[in-house]
Image (tube, helix red, strand yellow):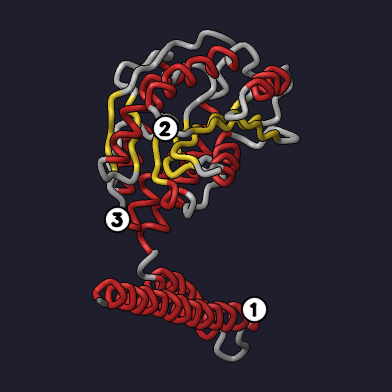
């Protein structure tokens, strides 16, 4: 059955939060007068989260449960929900009751107004200052500077997406917080909305300072994608230049070290790195051809679509 809206909630050891969360979502979304579904994605919980959620699903067919065999992390759980969602608009949120379902209607309204992504901003965040707020402010500033997409609260899980946009974005590691930056390659329209944030009522936080290194690695990946997506030849040319320089230095060292008895090791290293530079350059040319060919195909199909629309 086709849905207007899908609400996706990753869960990990949230047995006490599941029922009040379900009730809060139903209460808020029922007022919207739309067809909707809820997808609770259990990320390998070790408590009774699945049992509690399954009982709710038996009573309400709008609720579906997706269960992981072990804990994979928040991003894979979100990706599973997104892949299985049937709605035109997808909303993601945390399962710990810190996000407020009452904010869902205003996020959805932004998508209906023509935006591709609506991002929640926890302007009065109810979290610990040292372990959560300060690292988050630094991370958001850093992400904005590096990606060029100044989102105030990248870590807020409460977001709404146009389904045809988010389903084409690959998600892994901690990439869910970089979705606005990744979708900027397609020229998406992004709106930010102030949303409510509550202190955790049950259980313990699953996040901490140990997650910082993952975010930094993912940030480096995103920066590479954003910088070289449309210029693959430049990306490989930089690597080829560095490799060629090392190779030339090694050859010169081999020649000058002992003119009468050249060092074979230096020669071998020099030839190896110069060969590597040639391979990298060829890869860059191939990447450029693939990218340009894709652009030409998109332009071709766009012209065909335009001609079809203009036909009587």
Characterize the local packing of mark 3: few (<14), some (14-19) or many (20 or more) Cα atoms within 10 angstroms: few
User: Which comes before the other along the chain, label 3 or label 1?
Assistant: 3
Of the residues tagged 2 and 1, which is closer to the observer?
2
Image quadrant assignment for residue 311: bottom left
Q: Position of residue 149 (x, y in %)?
A: 29, 45
Tell whether 167 sits left or right of 123.
right
Characterize the local packing of mark 1: few (<14), some (14-19) or many (20 or more) Cα atoms within 10 angstroms: few
Residue at the image point whose x is 49% and y is 20% from the top: 26
Residue at the image point whose x is 27% and y is 45% from the top: 114
**Is 246 rendered above or below residue 195?**
below
**Is 281 rendered above or below residue 203?**
below
Would you name the residue on which mark 3 appears? 187
Under tag 2, what secondary structure? loop
Spatial CA span between label 2 and label 1: 71 Å
Spatial CA span between label 3 and label 1: 50 Å
Res 249 visible: no
Under tag 1, what secondary structure? helix
User: Which comes before the other along the chain, label 2 or label 3?
Assistant: 2
Residue lying at the far top in this picture: please name it: 201
Residue 34's label in the rendered image is 2
Camera-side residue of 254 and 295: 295
Image quadrant assignment for residue 66: top right
Q: Quadrant of the N terminus?
A: top right
Of the residues tagged 2 and 3, which is closer to the observer?
2
Residue 126's label in the rendered image is none
**Is 261 rendered above or below residue 224?**
below
Tell whether 94 sits left or right of 298.
right
Would you name the residue on which mark 1 appears? 265
Of the residues tagged 3 and 1, which is closer to the observer?
3
């Amino acid at each position: 059955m086709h849905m207007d809206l899908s609400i996706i909630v990753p869960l990990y050891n949230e047995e006490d939060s599941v029922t009040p969360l379900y009730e809060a979502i139903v209460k808020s979304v029922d007022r919207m007068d739309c067809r909707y579904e809820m997808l609770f994605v259990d990320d390998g919980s070790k408590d009774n989260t699945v049992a509690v959620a399954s009982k709710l699903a038996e009573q309400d067919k709008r609720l579906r449960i997706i269960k992981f065999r072990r804990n994979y992390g928040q991003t894979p759980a979100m990706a599973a929900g997104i892949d299985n969602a049937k709605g035109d608009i997808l909303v993601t949120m945390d399962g710990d009751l810190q996000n407020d379902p009452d904010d869902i209607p205003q996020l959805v309204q932004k998508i209906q107004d023509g935006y591709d992504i609506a991002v929640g901003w926890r302007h009065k965040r109810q979290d610990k200052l040292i372990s959560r707020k300060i690292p988050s402010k630094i991370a958001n500033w850093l992400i904005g500077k590096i990606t060029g997409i100044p989102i105030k609260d990248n870590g807020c899980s409460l977001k709404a997406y146009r389904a045809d946009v988010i389903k084409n974005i690959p998600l892994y590691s901690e990439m869910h917080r970089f979705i606005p930056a990744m979708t900027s390659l397609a020229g998406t329209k992004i709106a930010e909305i102030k949303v409510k944030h509550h202190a955790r009522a049950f259980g313990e936080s699953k996040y901490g300072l140990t997650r910082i290194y993952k975010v930094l690695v993912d940030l480096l990946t995103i920066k590479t994608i954003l910088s070289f997506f449309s210029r693959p030849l430049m990306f490989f040319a930089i690597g080829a230049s560095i490799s060629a320089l090392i190779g030339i230095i090694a050859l010169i060292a081999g020649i000058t070290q002992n003119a009468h008895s050249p060092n074979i090791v230096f020669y071998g290293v020099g030839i190896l790195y110069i060969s590597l530079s040639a391979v990298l350059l060829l890869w860059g040319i191939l990447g450029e051809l693939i990218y340009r060919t894709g652009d030409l195909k998109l332009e071709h199909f766009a012209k065909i679509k335009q001609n079809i629309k203009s036909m009587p």
